[in-house]
Image (spheres, grey):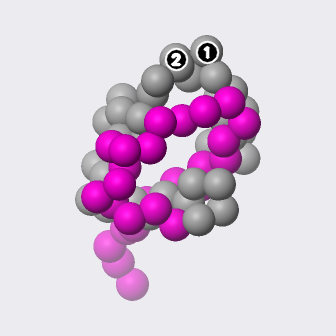
Amino acid sequence: MVQVRINGKERELPEATSLLQLLQERGIDPRVVVVEYNYEIVPRERYGEITLRDGDTLEIVQMTAGG
C-alpha cells in the first residue's frame, strides 16, 4: 500500500495504482478534471503513465458548467 495526499486528505492506495485508475475507480471522468501531481499540472494524455508512489500529493479539480 502507498500513502498519498488527495485534495489535502491522506489516502491509502494499492501499489501500482495509476493516476488514470484512481480517477476511474472514483467515478471521475478524466476529460473534465485538471490534476496537479506533486505541484505540477499533468496533461490528460499522461494520466495512464503516472504510477502513484508513497508521499505523492494530488489536487484534483473538477470543472463545472455554469456562470
- The local crowd at label 1, few if under 14, some if 14 to 19, many if 20 or more residues have their Cα within 10 Å, is few
- Quadrant in which the N terminus appears: top right
Task: In the rendered view, tell whether residue 59 sits above or below residue 26.
Answer: below
Write the residue at 38% across / 65% down. 43
Horizontal and vertical percent position of residue 27: 33, 37
Q: Amino acid at mark 2?
A: Pro
Residue wearing tag 2:
14
Query: Closest to the observer: 56 or 65?
Result: 56
Q: Amino acid at mark 1?
A: Met
**Element under disc 2:** loop
Horizontal and vertical percent position of residue 60: 52, 54
**Element under disc 1:** loop
Q: Is residue 31 left or right of residue 20?
A: left
Write the residue at 33% across / 43% down. 48
Residue wearing tag 1:
1
The magenta segment is 41-67
